[in-house]
């Protein structure tokens, strides 16, 4: 909003302010000056001003909160989570009590709240900051410490050989322009999608590399859990790998990796100048540039699950239209839109690394989404996030495909 | 616990462990809690002064135990247990009530309805939906919209309130002038009485079969029993929706125009009259509304020509009453911003004490009442803002919705300042022939005005309460009596 528009919008406040007596004006100014007293705490990662705002809100986004929907408990409504966190930070509630601390993790970081928030607040982001405070004080809810140790040991969220278990899935061309960065969930759970993505890049004539034998976790899940030191370790490690590889563009098949590399690394003090694309963004570009052409008939009926991270602006870009654009070009594809889609997509349950610390909640959310997707009657659930896809496969959503697999099916086999 | 509890009359429960064990046997151990953080989560509703208390490390009330039942049978057993032990029970929906009605002022059992959200039946022939009362408004809308229907009840708290809360507070939505208030929408209900009995009121479009018992539970604020299921009217989604707006110089003209429109039997879904202060606040982008009052109308119906006819009659009437046609932009602006609730989050930390007060009156008292409430509020030391709008209309009268905000003056506590604003508005309303609440309800906040509102009729209400709930376990300290506070 420009300055003039702002003046116009807030003129009434100025008028109200000056309508008071001298005494009232003085007190009002004092009120503004003392605001900080209501939220100040020493040494915190939390934006306490925003946390208090959220704590004072009547939960205007609660209907969209998946963790509330499956737990049914007021403690886990967005503003209530902020209120409990505010009291923890202000030392009114005991942070070391794990039941209290757990509130900060009862969130899948889906940003459904922000989508409806009149103040553009994400309770999920605030809770991520609260988690960092918990970890700083060495307060771990069950599952978190173990996950940290495992990722540090294996260097991925799964096994040491997650990226190398299938030999073919490691293409490294000379002078690469693109670093194809596979998410660890994709590599572990959906190698067929990695294969499809390789095919698409090859068809488009892209020079790319993968460095599968040097790949690690992007650090995103650790950051989400509040494990900032571990996250930073991986940020540095990945940037070193990108520097070594020399490609200027990074294409990921996981929007959470995109978000980590594009945005989170900077917040951890790890700067870089790489341009990061999701596969969906990059494929749209390739299609528009005519580098790939969907020619083959794909007579499947599909529905599409918008990953929350791609559809609510978290990455800094939005993939809603890109996915539909890709589907619209594929011959004979029967695309069936699910009722809640786009920015009002529903959580898959895997966000917030919830399946690690609260698997039942994560699965309950996943099952609700699968039921909605199946109501379309489509044969296949398609998405563009390996975590969502894994969640659906785990929660009776099969057959599940990645958008790359659908696109690859439509590309002719000849070169 | 590092909190001060504001309402000091927390009952003493001799054997809390025994109570918890008994409740756990009824609902299962996962659905009972005495954890500190959970008790704090359920310590308040959205009465605005409680936000100040958050920042002062206070909790309004503190329950002893939270319980999340799954069905009527469990609720029945919980109430039987509470009755035997004479322990207060407070039903809880989504805590968006603004009068303190869900605050556990005497502690006891907080009974959250959020596990009961099923849609039991959608009857397309009767145009009814039967739903459990823990269902959230927006969630219900989504379920019905997919099937091509709406319920037409859209309070501003739609995203954060339940069917049970609407019934308990006799709520009114933004589209109420066409679709009716909750009492016009609910046809029948299932209630668990304090003695554990489960009753279903009969479903009919209308009947002459004795006093309508279900009416008793509308506005009963959880004091007579727990409503667990309701059958409500639904409508097919409208074919056409159209908005129009007018600016007026005087509130008298805007009220006159609206009165004439309603009395011509035109029922716009939305009618909103904003006074000059609120017009400046919300419609700063509308040049014709400068220093004037904005009025917006939205009409919708399954038949397009009906909407066109209504809009043309509205236009004719408004122009005859000195209104200036401002087109559709202000209506679009209202649609875009109608759920933007952020003032309290932004201004309460800056020391402002604020609230909203809605009342109703007959048409012949309307102009006088509006001016009287605004004037009385403005007289208060420390008060910076007093404004109003009208948003629910009847052929016979209107609801005004006032907002006040100010800074606590020297020598007063925030609560004293807050109460003085409420007192000023309530006295002005009663003196002008108005009723003390149109749709937010009584709760704790307005209980002290119930005698003036009802006179001896309040005694009859108390007798009815006593017959249904002789041990006064259901939400004590609300409606009929005022709880003590420090
Ligand atoms: C921003 C905002 C805007 C609002 N706008 C409107 C509006 O436009 N129109 C309007 O009418 N109100 C409005 N309200 C007030 C409030 O939302 C309503 O009163 C709503 O009906 C409360 O529903 P709830 O589920 O949150 O109830 P709660 O606050 O949880 O409870 C309210 C009362 O109902 C009782 N109760 C809850 N469930 C049951 C049940 N199943 N059986 C028996 N008793 C029960 C509780 O004990 C309590 O006494 C608004 C509030 C806010 C914060
Ligand atoms: S995220 Fe925004 S809308 Fe949701 S509870 Fe917080 S402040 Fe309210
Ligand atoms: S990010 Fe998602 S899960 Fe977390 S509070 Fe917001 S809506 Fe709820």
Image: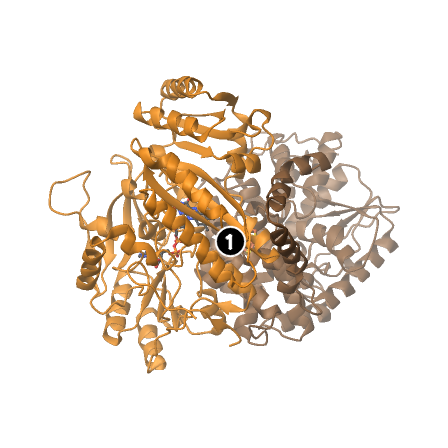
Chain colours: A brown, B orange
Q: Residue at x 83, y 55 (%)?
A: A271
- The answer to whether residue A341 is above or below residue A209 is above
Residue B332 higher or lower than A98, as above or below: above
Q: Quadrant of residue B460?
A: bottom left
For the C terminus of chain B, the quadrant is: bottom left
The x and y percentages for residue B314 are 40, 21
**Towards the viewer: B26 or B422:** B422
Q: Position of residue B301 (x, y in %)?
A: 37, 26
**Which of A394 and A47 lies nearest the eye of the viewer?**
A47
Local crowd at mark 1 within 10 Å, few (<14), some, or many (≥20)? many
Label 1 CB-ligand 3 distance < 8 A? yes
Residue B258 in sight from this viewpoint: yes
Q: Position of residue A89 (x, y in %)?
A: 62, 69
Residue at screen point 21% across, 50% down: B214
Q: Report the chain holding disc 1.
A: A
Give the residue at mark 1. A65
Between A54 and A351, which is closer to the camera in this rendering? A54
């Amino acid at each position: 909003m420009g300055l003039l528009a702002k003046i116009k919008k807030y003129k009434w406040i100025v008028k109200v302010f000056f309508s008071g007596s001298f005494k009232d004006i003085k007190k009002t100014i004092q009120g503004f000056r003392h605001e900080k007293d209501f939220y100040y705490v020493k040494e915190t990662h939390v934006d306490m001003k925003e946390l208090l705002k959220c704590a004072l809100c009547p939960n205007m986004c609660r209907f969209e909160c998946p963790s509330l929907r499956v737990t049914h408990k007021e403690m886990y409504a967005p503003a209530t989570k902020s209120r409990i966190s505010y009291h923890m930070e202000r030392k009114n509630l005991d942070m070391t009590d794990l039941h209290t601390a757990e509130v900060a993790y009862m969130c899948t970081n889906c940003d459904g709240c922000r989508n409806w928030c009149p103040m553009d607040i994400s309770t999920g982001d605030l809770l991520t900051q609260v988690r960092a405070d918990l970890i700083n004080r060495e307060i771990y809810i069950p599952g978190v410490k173990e996950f940290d140790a495992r990722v540090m040991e294996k260097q991925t969220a799964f096994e040491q050989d997650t990226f190398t278990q299938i030999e073919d899935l490691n293409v490294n061309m000379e002078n690469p322009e693109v670093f194809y960065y596979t998410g660890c969930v994709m590599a572990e759970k959906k190698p067929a999608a990695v294969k499809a993505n390789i095919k698409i890049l090859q068809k488009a004539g892209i020079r790319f590399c993968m460095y599968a034998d040097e790949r690690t976790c992007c650090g995103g899940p650790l950051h989400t859990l509040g494990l900032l030191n571990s996250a930073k370790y991986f940020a540095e490690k990945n940037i070193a790998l990108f520097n070594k590889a020399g490609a200027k563009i990074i294409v990921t098949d996981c929007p959470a990796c995109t978000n980590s590399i594009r945005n989170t690394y900077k917040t951890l003090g790890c700067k870089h100048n790489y341009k990061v694309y999701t596969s969906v963004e990059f494929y749209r570009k390739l299609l528009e540039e005519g580098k790939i052409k969907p020619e083959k008939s794909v007579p499947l009926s599909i529905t599409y699950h918008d990953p929350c991270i791609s559809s609510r602006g978290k990455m800094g870009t939005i993939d809603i239209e890109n996915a539909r654009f890709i589907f619209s070009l594929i011959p004979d594809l029967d695309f069936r839109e699910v009722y809640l889609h786009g920015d009002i997509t529903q959580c898959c349950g895997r966000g917030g690394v919830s399946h690690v610390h609260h698997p039942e909640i994560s699965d309950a959310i996943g099952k609700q989404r699968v039921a909605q997707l199946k109501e379309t009657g489509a044969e296949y659930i398609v998405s563009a996030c390996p975590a969502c896809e894994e969640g659906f496969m785990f929660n009776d959503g099969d057959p599940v495909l990645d958008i790359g697999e659908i696109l690859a099916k439509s590309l002719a086999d000849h070169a | 616990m590092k909190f001060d509890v504001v309402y000091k009359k927390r009952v003493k429960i001799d054997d809390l462990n025994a109570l918890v064990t008994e409740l756990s046997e009824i609902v299962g151990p996962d659905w009972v809690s005495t954890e500190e953080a959970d008790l704090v989560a359920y310590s308040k509703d959205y009465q605005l002064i409680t936000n100040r208390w958050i920042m002062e490390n206070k909790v309004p009330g503190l329950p002893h135990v939270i319980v999340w039942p799954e069905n009527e049978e469990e609720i029945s057993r919980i109430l039987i247990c509470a009755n035997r032990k004479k322990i207060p029970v407070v039903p809880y929906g989504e805590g968006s009530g603004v009068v303190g009605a869900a605050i556990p002022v005497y502690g006891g059992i907080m009974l959250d309805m959020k596990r009961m959200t099923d849609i039991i039946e959608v009857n397309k022939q009767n145009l009814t939906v039967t739903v459990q009362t823990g269902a959230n408004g927006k969630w219900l809308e989504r379920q019905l919209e997919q099937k091509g229907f709406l319920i037409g009840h859209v309070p501003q708290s739609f995203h954060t309130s339940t069917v049970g809360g609407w019934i308990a507070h006799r709520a009114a939505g933004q589209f109420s002038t066409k679709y009716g208030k909750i009492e016009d929408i609910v046809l029948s209900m299932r209630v668990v009485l304090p003695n554990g009995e489960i009753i279903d009121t009969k479903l009919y479009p209308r009947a002459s079969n004795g006093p309508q018992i279900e009416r008793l539970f509308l506005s009963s604020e959880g004091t007579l029993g727990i409503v667990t299921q309701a059958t409500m009217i639904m409508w097919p989604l409208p074919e056409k929706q159209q908005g129009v707006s007018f600016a007026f110089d005087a509130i008298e003209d805007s009220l006159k125009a609206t009165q004439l429109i309603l009395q011509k039997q035109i029922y716009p879904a939305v009618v909103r009259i904003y006074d000059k202060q609120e017009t400046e606040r919300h419609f700063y982008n509308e040049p014709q509304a400068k220093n004037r009052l904005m009025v917006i109308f939205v009409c919708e119906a399954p038949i397009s020509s009906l909407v066109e006819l209504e809009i043309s009659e509205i236009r004719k009437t408004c122009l005859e009453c000195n209104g200036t046609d401002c087109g559709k932009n202000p209506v679009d602006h209202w649609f875009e911003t109608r759920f933007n609730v952020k003032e309290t989050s932004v201004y309460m930390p800056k020391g402002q004490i604020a609230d909203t007060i809605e009342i109703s009156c007959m048409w012949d008292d309307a102009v006088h009442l509006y001016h009287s409430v605004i004037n009385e509020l403005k007289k208060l030391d420390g008060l910076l803002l007093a404004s109003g709008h009208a948003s629910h209309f009847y052929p016979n009268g209107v609801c005004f919705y006032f907002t006040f905000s100010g800074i606590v003056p020297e020598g007063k506590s925030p609560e004293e300042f807050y109460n003085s604003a409420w007192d000023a508005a309530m006295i002005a309303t009663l003196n002008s022939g108005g009723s003390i609440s149109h749709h937010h309800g009584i709760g704790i906040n307005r209980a002290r005005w119930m005698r003036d509102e009802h006179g001896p009729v309040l005694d009859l209400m108390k007798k009815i309460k006593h017959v249904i709930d002789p041990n006064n376990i259901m939400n004590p300290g609300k409606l009929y009596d005022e709880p003590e506070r420090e």
